[in-house]
């Protein structure tokens, strides 16, 4: 797994002299650098500033499926009380996100009622 360095790619393409035999593909391949992140970490990660709840979104397109590492990561997020979403379309993501955050609000409200009683 690697990380694409867009600044390096842009500089290499701009610096390319006319009539050289470098291909854009060759330049772009050199602009990947090894990543030190853990395999399976979701494409989008963050947290809710108010609650501190972790949110992980894995983006999938077409016939793309979760890898074993991605599945493991999302399950770990859920076990830890976070929100884990696999987004295949934008509309599905929005629906799942609001379902998850609505459920979290209900759980918080239930907990606060229990403490008051």
Image (tube, helix red, strand yellow):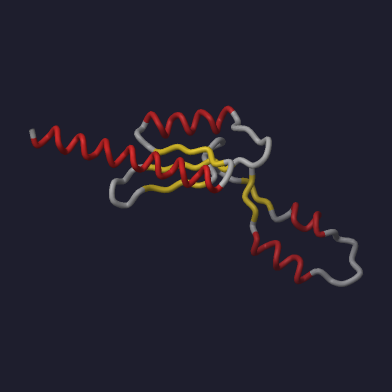
Q: Nearer the viewer, residue 79 or 18?
A: 79
- What's the residue at 45%, 40% (across, down)? 96
Depicted 59 relative to depicted 65: above or below: below
77 to 101, vertically: above or below: above
Q: Is residue 8 above or below residue 104?
A: below
Question: In the figure, residue 102 lies in which quadrant?
Answer: top left
Q: Quadrant of the N terminus?
A: top right
| Residue at x 29% of width, y 46% of height | 51
Q: Residue 66: image x %, image y %?
A: 59, 32
Residue 48 image position (x, y, % from top left): 35, 49
What residue occupies the far left of the structure in this picture? 117
Q: Is residue 52 left or right of residue 114?
A: right
**Quarter containing the C terminus:** top left
Q: Nearer the viewer, residue 23 or 114?
A: 114
Q: Is residue 78 left or right of residue 33?
A: left
User: Looking at the image, how many numbered discs can be counted on the residues?
Assistant: 0
Residue at screen point 28% across, 42% down = 105
Residue 94 horizontal/vertical position (percent): 47, 47
């Amino acid at each position: 797994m690697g990380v694409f360095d867009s600044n390096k790619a842009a500089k290499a393409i701009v610096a390319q002299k006319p009539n050289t035999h470098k291909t854009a593909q060759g330049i772009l391949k050199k602009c990947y650098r090894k990543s030190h992140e853990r395999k399976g970490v979701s494409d989008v990660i963050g947290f809710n500033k108010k609650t501190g709840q972790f949110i992980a979104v894995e983006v999938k397109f077409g016939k793309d499926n979760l890898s074993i590492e991605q599945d493991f990561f999302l399950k770990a997020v859920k076990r830890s009380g976070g929100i884990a979403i696999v987004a295949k379309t934008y509309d599905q993501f929005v629906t799942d996100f609001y379902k998850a955050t609505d459920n979290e609000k209900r759980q918080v409200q239930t907990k606060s009622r229990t403490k008051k009683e």
